[in-house]
Image: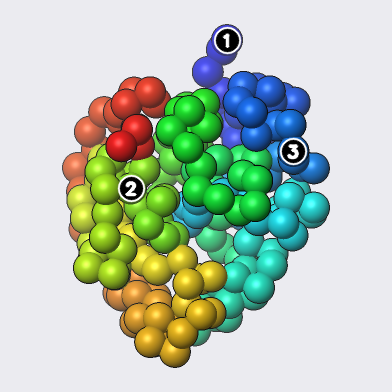
Amino acid sequence: MKEAATLAELRENLGVCTRCGLHQGRTNIVFGAGDENADLLFVGEGPGRVEDAKGVPFVGPAGKLLDELLQSISLTRSRVYITNVVKCRPPGNRDPIPDEIEKCNRYLVRQIELIKPKVLCALGRVAAGVILQRNVQITRLHGQKVEGPGYFIVPVLHPAAALRSAQNMAMIREDFENLRKYLDEDAVPPKTPAPEPEQMGLF
């Protein structure tokens, strides 16, 4: 299959995906949304119930908080890009399993390559683990800047976790202040070859 040159072509290549078992319970594929040339790319773990119904990432309660957090650092949804590790909702909002992650990884890798972000923000433990290719303690690593191949990786708490406690809310607000600082910096890491899709995130 010819490598997609645009996000639209990549979505077309994904098609009516049946590559893993998640397709059996989904309503919509949630591919991603936002600015295709965004400096800031968000990657969550997977769609929830509202996202599955609407086919758009982060439109439930966690998405409303994400919009508020973006506004707090002078950004809007239209100026960032938002996607997930897996594009279909896991049953009961459970964590995606390695096979599901592997089947979606080539599409996530190509999304990152096409968008060319300055900062990739991994929302939550699962997304951070996939992007960093190791198990992550999100409460220890959150808000820190890690060098990636041509962009910085910044794990933050998942907005859904922030909604559950005032302490988490304070942490994620601080994380977003850090995101603003990283976006305003001039330097970016050197571009290095991206990992092969099957090597990403199978921890």
Q: Is residue 53 left or right of residue 5?
A: right
Picture disc at residue 25? 3
Residue found at x 65% / y 46%: 91
- What residue is disc 2 on? 129
Instruction: Name the amino acid, label 2.
Output: Gly
Q: Nearer the viewer, residue 3 or 18?
A: 18
The quadrant in which residue 81 appears is bottom right
Residue found at x 44% / y 40%: 112
Secondary structure of the residue carrying numbered label 2: helix
Expressed as whole percent of the image width and height from the top left, the position of residue 116 reads 41, 44
Q: Nearer the viewer, residue 53 or 38?
A: 53
Q: Residues within 10 Å of mark 3 (few under 14, many from 20)?
A: few
Expressed as whole percent of the image width and height from the top left, the position of residue 143 reads 29, 70
- Above-or-below relation of 141 to 13: below
Mark sitting earlier along the chain (2/1) = 1
Expressed as whole percent of the image width and height from the top left, the position of residue 127 reads 41, 50
- Above-or-below relation of 137 to 134: below
